[in-house]
Amino acid sequence: MLYACSQTISCIPLLKMGLLPYLDTILVPLSFFLLFGYHGFLWNICKKKSNLTTIKINKIRRRSWVLSITEDPTDNKLMFAVQTLRNTQMVIVLTATIAIIINSSLAAYTNNAYKANHLLKDSYFGLQSSRIIVLKYGSASLFLLSGFLCNSVAIGCLSEANILAVVTSLPLGYVQGMMERGFLFTFIGNRMLYITVPLLLWLLGPIPMVLSSITMVWVLYEIDFTSCVLEQESLQSSMTRTID
């Protein structure tokens, strides 16, 4: 009996050694597959059945908003349009600031990462070699900088749309195209920031990364599809009230 217990205890380090590569080689690709697979699914839905997404509904609302302003360009409506686009730019600036602050903090933390390796030697934290640490910090930094770049381009496009909205002699399609381009880059920049959350949790191990990926996919699905159904129902109810 004592011999069997001693053999079991001696096998625990071997199990942990076998579990160490298993966590990173299985859970990390699974997390990437969930995140990018969901956005591939969203891209397919946007191409085939775009009316099922909030992206299409928001696009229709923005188009009708620009149309209502350009058809009757009074001073109050033009001022309202400029203030609305300015508030949107402030939100994008805040998102870009958060991305660059996290990236700067991540770069500062990377300098001390090698010294803190002894704190994360447990197998549940996954591999902690020098190459894996560089991969973790590099991937998170890449998505943060990409999100910052997309938000910066979005600010430029919306600033241009802010100026074009006041000029009533320009074609309506040009103003709408510039504004939609800005919101497209805003959407991409926000999604880059969302994907960075599981990558930051990868620093604590592959288990928090895969759990955060599942949670992130569920949250994004609620944003992209479930709220769309509620918005469609509210639009239909408002239309029926108007008809009545």
Image: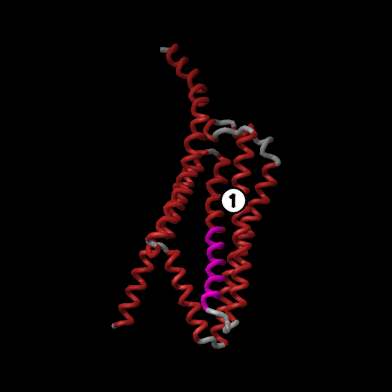
Q: Quadrant of residue 54?
A: bottom left
Q: Residue at horizontal 57%, vertical 73%?
A: 85
The magenta stretch spans which residues?
172-188
Q: Residue at horizontal 62%, vertical 34%?
A: 119
Percent of width and height locating residue 97: 64, 59
Percent of width and height locating residue 210: 48, 42
The front one of 191 and 51 is 51
The front one of 3 and 176 is 176
How busy is the neighbourhood of tag 1: few (under 14 within 10 Å), some, or many (20 plus)? many
Q: Main secondary structure of the magenta part?
A: helix
Q: Residue at horizontal 38%, vertical 59%?
A: 48
Residue 153 magenta = no
Q: Seen in the image, is 36 located left or right of residue 189?
A: left
Q: Quadrant of residue 178?
A: bottom right
Residue 181 magenta = yes
Q: Seen in the image, is 138 located left or right of residue 188?
A: right
Q: Is 221 above or below relative to 180?
A: above
Q: Residue at horizontal 31%, vertical 80%?
A: 241
Percent of width and height locating residue 182: 56, 67
Q: Is 178 above or below relative to 134?
A: below
The N terminus sits in image quarter: top left
Circle 1: residue type? Phe
The C terminus sits in image quarter: bottom left
Label 1 residue SS: helix
Q: Which residue is mark 1?
A: 143
The front one of 132 and 219 is 132
